[in-house]
Amino acid sequence: MTSQALAIPQKSAHPLRLFWIASLSMMLIVAQSVMASARGAPETFADLADQVSPSVVNITTSTTVAGRAGPQGIVPEGSPFEDFFREFQDRQGPSQPRRSSALGSGFVISEDGYIVTNNHVIESADEITIEFFSGEELPAEVVGTDPNTDIALLKVDSDEPLPFVPFGDSDTARVGDWVMAMGNPLGQGFSVSAGIVSARNRELSGTYDDYIQTDAAINRGNSGGPLFNMAGEVIGVNTAILSPNGGSIGIGFSMASNVVTRVVDQLQEYGETRRGWLGVRIQDVTDDVAEALDLASSEGALVSDVPEGPAAEAGMEAGDVIVSFDGKKVTDTRQLVRIVGNTTVGKTVRVVVNRDGETQTLRVTLGRREDTETAVPASQEVVPDQPSSMDLMGLTLAPLDDEMRENLELGGDVEGLAVMDVDPTSEAYEKGLRAGDVITEAGQDNVASLGDFETRLQDARDAGRKSILLLVRRGGDPRFVALSLEQEPEAAPAEE
């Protein structure tokens, strides 16, 4: 509508001019209402805060800390005052154990007293006290914890049904949606902050991470508190902040509710988590790995090792690329780990793999991950003084012998080439190969000698490949690495 069309006739009768003014005012009000509705901006968060506050709790923990003896932490090690302080503390004797307190937040999820918080809030606590919005305090017991997602489930006994809040579907939360955080920031008591969903599917450091990022103010003490959508449903558990100074700078992370609910259900039923276990070591399919395997895309999860377990029993092999699991398309390793972990232990699933350019479907009965988690020993360096070595692709290689196998803690039946040295300017060094690594496959075929390795290189060149796929083992942990074949000079034996 043009400005001319909206112009008020100057010679109109006074009532008509009033009509025009009233009409324009109404149009402006309607337009503003439509814009506010489109943005979804609430007029106030007060009603929502009143609704959910009774279900949010403050958590106080108490822990016995053992006394320390000696001058640790008082003076730097090697200081000329070290002996003086040691003698002084020896006369004083060891300090007595003391009580340490910590604060956090949580929320009630059932009227019979189940409470969700972060594992780090209650970890190692001797006593846990729950303070409700009303001021009532109750002792709590730990039902179960899951350090992998930093979630803990507590239980209090109450004579009356407790107000609680439901979980929402975190997968429906969109970037830009309004959210509200509640908790006990910096020990100041119940507090509310509001903001939006800043990002989704954030990963910090855990295998099962699926964080919602928000700019709603989250500070120390907010840990374990709920992140609400505008329907009063919990879509996240406030867990971490990104900050150079320990205070909120508008980058907070809440573990997504769809992860939390599965953990809570298992903790409530078993007192522990029970995640599915496939029994493979996997890595992402990079573009160069996809080219080396002649794959159409870099989607999927590349199997680098198949130890004894469910996948091995089903016939899975190193070099397979998992493209589908239990009817779900696999895009990368992170997604596969989460899908497998969320699948019921003991369930038989169909796993589709790409092997030698063809797809195969395997039926795998999942085990339990918690029963199989073990530490992997670190690799040891090989002293590069062995004869019959060769320089290839920036690598100095030598066949494994019994002494190398012993130094690297390898089984007597392991065959391959030991990496004696890596050129720091080479592609191999850039992609993480180091002295002490062992190459057991090249081009998806075993290599036991330098001649085998040269043959695999030539076969890859003859096939028109731009890169070759190596299976590299370090301390028992295998991974695939693709190295370029372009302009590779002819190999020359090293001096013996």
Image (cartoon, rainbow, N blue to C red):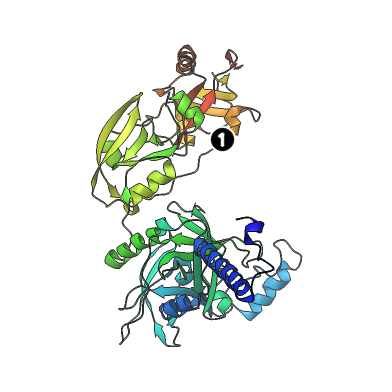
For label 1, the SS is loop
Between 450 and 145, the one lying in front of the other is 145
Residue 220 in picture, x, y percent from top left? 57, 70
Residue drawn at 72 percent across, 61 percent down: 78
Position in image of residue 135 (x %, y %): 45, 88
Count of marks, rendered view: 1
Q: Can you say whether 183 is above or below 366 in the image?
A: below
Q: For this rendering, which residue is in front, 152 or 74?
A: 152
Q: Would you say 394 lies left or right of 197 here?
A: right
Q: Amino acid at mark 1?
A: Gly
Of residue 349 and residue 459, the one placed in the foreground of this image is 349
Is residue 307 rendered to the left or right of residue 25? left
Residue at horizontal 59 percent and vertical 68 percent from the top: 24
State which quadrant residue 117 falls in: bottom left
> Badge 1 local density, few (<14 within 10 Å), some, or many (20+)?
few
Q: Quadrant location of the N terminus?
A: bottom right
* Nearer-the-camera pick, 126 or 131: 131
Q: Which residue is mark 1?
A: 432
Please give left or right for residue 196 compared with residue 349 in the image. Answer: right
User: Which residue is at a point 65% across and 66% down the rendered structure image?
Assistant: 8
Residue extending furthest right?
80
* Image x and y of residue 214, in percent: 54, 61
Give the quadrant of the C terminus: top right
Location of residue 272 by image quarter: bottom left
- Does residue 127 appear in the picture of this structure? no
Vertical side of 266 occupied by 106: above or below:
below
